[in-house]
Image (cartoon, rainbow, N blue to C red):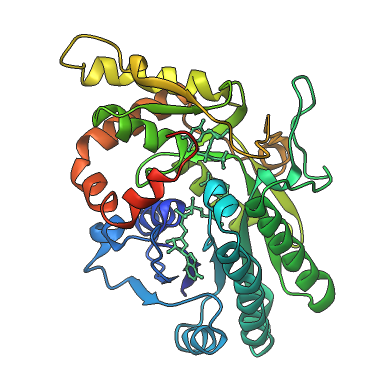
Amino acid sequence: MTICVTGGAGFIGSNFVLDWLARSDEPVLNVDRLTYAGNLENLKEVDSDPRHVFAKGDIGDFDLLSDLFSRYMPRAIIHLAAESHVDRSIHGPADFIHTNIVGTFRLLEAARAYWAGLAEPEKIAFRFLHVSTDEVYGSLETGDPAFREDNRYEPNSPYSASKAASDHLVRAYHHTYGLPVLTTNCSNNYGPFHFPEKLIPLCIHNALSGRTLPIYGDGQQVRDWLYVKDHCSAIRRVLEAGILGETYNVGGWNEKANLSVVHALCTVLDELKPRADGQSYAAQITFVEDRPGHDRRYAIDATKLERELGWKPVETFDTGIRKTVQWYLDNQAWVNNVTTGTYQRWVGKQYGN
Ligand code: NAD
Ligand code: TYD
C-alpha cells in the first residue's frame, strides 16, 4: 500500500512525510511543484529511502496525476499542496486561485477518476484527506466562542477565500460523487522547516541577523498556535478513524497575541544565544503598518477531534517554541539556503519593513 501526499516538500508536508516514514513502512508518493516554499532539503533524511518516491509536478496537471495514481495505486491522498502565505495573497492573489482552487479541482478530478476505477475493497477503503485552515471561518472578537465545525464560512483574505473554495469543492465531490473525503481545519502551525516569511520563523531569523522584528499594527491580534508535529498526528488520526464527509477542527488551545508570541521567542533566544551586547532580542521589536484586512482573532475548539477520535496535542506553546528556536539555531545552513535569491526581494516588499 502507498499514500500520496501533495505539497510534501513544504513546511507541514515535509514534517508529515518524515513522521509518516518514521512510524510506518508504508511508502509515500510525494507530489510537489517545488515553488519557493517547497524544498527537497527538508527531506534529505529520506533521500535514499526507497519508501519515499518524489514526483515534481503541479496538482493542476490531471494527466501527470492520473499516470502517477495508476502506477503507484495510493490508498489515500493527503492534500497539503497550496499557496499558504496571507501577505503574498494580498500582493498577488492569482497563484492562490491557480493552485488552491483550480489545482484542488484538477486533483479532485484525477482522484475521482482513479477511485471510480478501483475494485470494491480498495474503493471502499480509499480516502481523500483535504488539509485546510481555521482562517476560512473569518475573524473573532475578544470573548466570542472559538470556531467549531458548524461555524459559517466568512473568509477575509484572498488566501482564506481560496482555501474556503477548495473546502467547498471537496465537500461537493463527496455529496455529488460519493468521493470518500475528510477535511481538517487547523490553526497556525510552527516548528522545523517553517519558511521564514511567517511570523515565528521570520522573527527568529531577523533576530539572529540583527534585523527588526516587524509587528503589524498593535500586535494584539490573536492566533491559536499548534506545534507542527501535533498537526501531523491529527492528520494521521483523522485518516485512520475520521467519518467520511466530516470536517475536524485541529488546534492547540494556545491562543496568544502576536506581540506575546514574539516576546516569548525572544526570551528563549536570550537564554540559548544571548546577544553580544547583553540586551534582549526584544529591543529589535518594531511596530509597522498593519496588514490590510487583518483578522483580529482566530481560536479553535478542537473538542470534536479530541472526543470522537481521541486526539490530543503533545506540546504546549512553551515546549514547542523552545524546540522551534533550538531547531533554527541548529539549522542555520537551512535558513541561509532558503533566504537567498527571491526571498530577499519579497521581504523588501513587506509593510513598513
Ligand atoms: P507551504 O507553503 O510551506 O508548502 C506548500 C507546498 O505546496 C510547497 O512544497 C509547494 O512547493 C507546494 N505547492 C504549491 N503549489 C503547488 C502546486 N500547484 N502543485 C504542487 N505543489 C505545489 O505550506 P504549509 O504551511 O506547509 O501548508 C500546507 C497546507 O496546510 C496548506 O494547504 C495550508 O493551507 C494548510 N495549513 C497551513 C497552516 C499553517 O500554519 N502553515 C495551518 C493550517 C492549514
Ligand atoms: P502569519 O505567520 O503570516 O500567519 P497567518 O496570517 O496565516 O495567521 O502571521 C501570524 C500573525 O502575525 C498575523 O496576525 C500577522 C502577524 N505578523 C506580524 O505581525 N508581522 C509579520 O512580519 C508577519 C509575517 C505576521
Q: Residue furthest top?
A: 278
Q: Nearer the viewer, residue 113 or 21?
A: 113
Position of 88 compared to 176: left or right? left
Tell me where residue 18 appears, x and y as whole percent: 36, 55
For the question of whether residue 159 can be seen, the reply is: yes
How many numbered circles does the render carry? 0
Image quarter of the C terminus: top left
150 sits left or right of 251 in the view: right
Can residue 299 be seen in the rendering of this structure?
no
Instruction: Pinpoint residue 336: horizontal percent, then vertical percent.
Output: 22, 46
Percent of width and height locating residue 138: 74, 41
In the image, residue 22 sits, relative to residue 319, either above or below, namely below
Q: Is residue 307 above or below residue 246?
A: above
* Nearest to the observer: residue 148 or residue 288: 288
| Residue name at image x 76 percent, y 56 percent | 246
As rendered, which of 39 and 97 lies closer to the eye? 97
- Using residue 278 as the reference point, say whether residue 302 is left or right of it: right
Q: Residue furthest left?
A: 276
- Residue pictured at 46% horizontal, 51% vertical: 12
User: At x 38% / y 44%, what residue is drawn?
Assistant: 348
Q: Position of residue 189 (x, y in %)?
A: 50, 40
- Name the residue located 45 percent from the left edge and 83 percent from the top edge: 72
